[in-house]
Amino acid sequence: MAIVTGASRGIGLAIAERLVERGAKVCVTARKPGPLQEAVKELGGAGHAIAVSGKSDDPAHQEEAVARTVEAFGRLDLLVNNTGINPVHGPMLDIDDAAAAKILAVNVLAPLAWIRRARDAWMGEHGGAVVNVASVAGIQASSGIGLYGVSKAALMHLTVQLAADLGPGIRVNAVAPAVVKTRFATAMYEGREEEAATRYPMKRLGVPEDIAGAVAFLLSDEANWITGQTLVVDGGLTITGGV
């Protein structure tokens, strides 16, 4: 049984759909209740999914989501930290302190807190698997989204550290997508998708299903000897030196 944060649409919803297809029951979270209820319908209704709305970095929301998942499904085996924000665009030194703190709170400290709560509620005693959704922006310099990249680099190292700390019972891995066609990434390709895709050896941008398949694999028993790794899912972008 799983929690997927930031799952009312885009990558998070695609991950939840893939997990439901594989037999899991899923708690999906996001800020707005309306889109979350629509997501539950897409996932097959109350027999397959529940929704808990709230801000990912809110401790009360984290506690409620974990408690309701264990109450509804009897266990919590899988956690996907998908929520991420990038509220500003431009030179990193021009970002004000409040915005910088918020990016780090949501993209780094919130995943740490979710993992702690999952460990305490179920995984610490019974085992489990975690996947953090990072970004190729955390691997190379990325114009205009520098602090977002810093936060994702931190998330990838958090993945390594927690894999070492929580093994063998809890596996912790990450995926690092390039540009995926979602509302979140619209500014990266809108109106110039064909041009943007030329930088990729695969000659297309990603779609949510590309990431969902990688996440589902890392959560599955097929990946039982994989922990502390970041799987780059980028259509070959980073092998050409581009981000």
Image: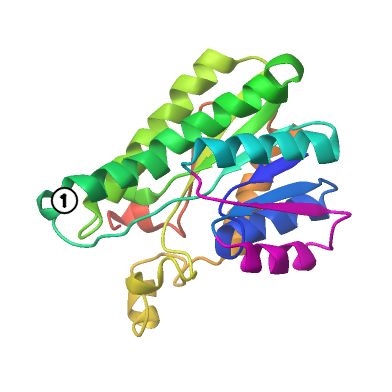
**Which residue ends up furthest to the right in the rendered image?**
47
Q: Residue 156 at x, y = what percent? A: 41, 35
139 left or right, relative to 177: left
Which residue type does callout 1 highlight?
Answer: Asp
Q: Which residues are magenta?
A: 32-56
Q: Residue 85 at x, y = what percent? A: 39, 54
Q: Residue 38 at x, y = what percent? A: 71, 69
Displayed quadrant of residue 161: top left
The residue that mark 1 highlights is 96
Instruction: Identify the residue at horizontal 28%, vertical 58% (top origin).
Output: 242
Front-most of 121 and 203? 121
Label 1 Cα neighbours within 10 Å, binned few <14 / some 14-19 / many ≥20: few
Instruction: Identify the residue at horizontal 75%, vertical 39% (top origin).
Output: 69
Q: Residue 218 at x, y = what percent? A: 64, 38
**Which residue ends up furthest to the bottom in the rendered image?**
191
Q: Is residue 131 visible?
A: no
**As drawn, 62 above or below 36:** above
Does 33 appear in magenta?
A: yes
Displayed quadrant of residue 210: bottom right
At numbered mark 1, what does the secondary structure look like: helix, strand or loop?
loop
Q: Is residue 241 visible?
A: yes
What colouring does the structure picture have?
A: rainbow
Instruction: Identify the residue at horizontal 25%, vertical 50% (top origin).
Output: 99
